[in-house]
Amino acid sequence: MSDHITSETISRRKLLSVLGLGLALAVPTATLTVSEAEAQTTGMTRRQDRRTGRHERRDDRRTGRTDRRDARRTGGTQQ
């Protein structure tokens, strides 16, 4: 029953691997505790507004083309 406890020095490589493992286990835990906050920024909002405007203008152009095409095919305006 004479167990001798010896202290050995730990190498930098082993120390970094242990710290890396601890960090790898700690990061997913920290990300799970973050709330589901809305991530809208002013730049994202402006971008969405521009995109919506482009879509509306495109739809207006398509509708105008269709109306003009139909008018040509039916003989223009009725007088």
Image (cartoon, helix red, strand yellow):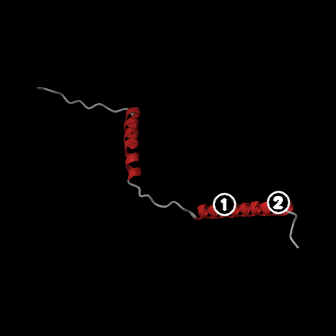
Q: Is residue 39 left or right of residue 70?
A: left
Q: Nearer the viewer, mark 1 or mark 2?
A: 2
Q: Residue drawn at (40%, 37%), measured in percent from left and top?
A: 16
Q: Is residue 22 above or below residue 61?
A: above
**Crowd around label 2: few <14 · some 14–19 · many ≥20 (10 Å):** few
| Image quadrant where residue 59 sits | bottom right
Q: Is residue 23 left or right of residue 45?
A: left
Residue 18 x/y as whole percent: 37, 37
Of mark 1 and mark 2, the one earlier in the sequence is: 1
According to the picture, the residue beneath numbered tag 1 turns out to be: 51
Point out the residue furthest to the bottom here.
Answer: 79
Q: Residue drawn at (77%, 62%), measured in percent from left and top?
A: 61
Point out the residue furthest to the left here.
Answer: 1
Disc 2 marks a residue whose amino acid type is: Arg
**Residue 69, label in figure:** 2
Quadrant location, the C terminus: bottom right
* Distance (Cα) linking label 1 and label 2: 27 Å
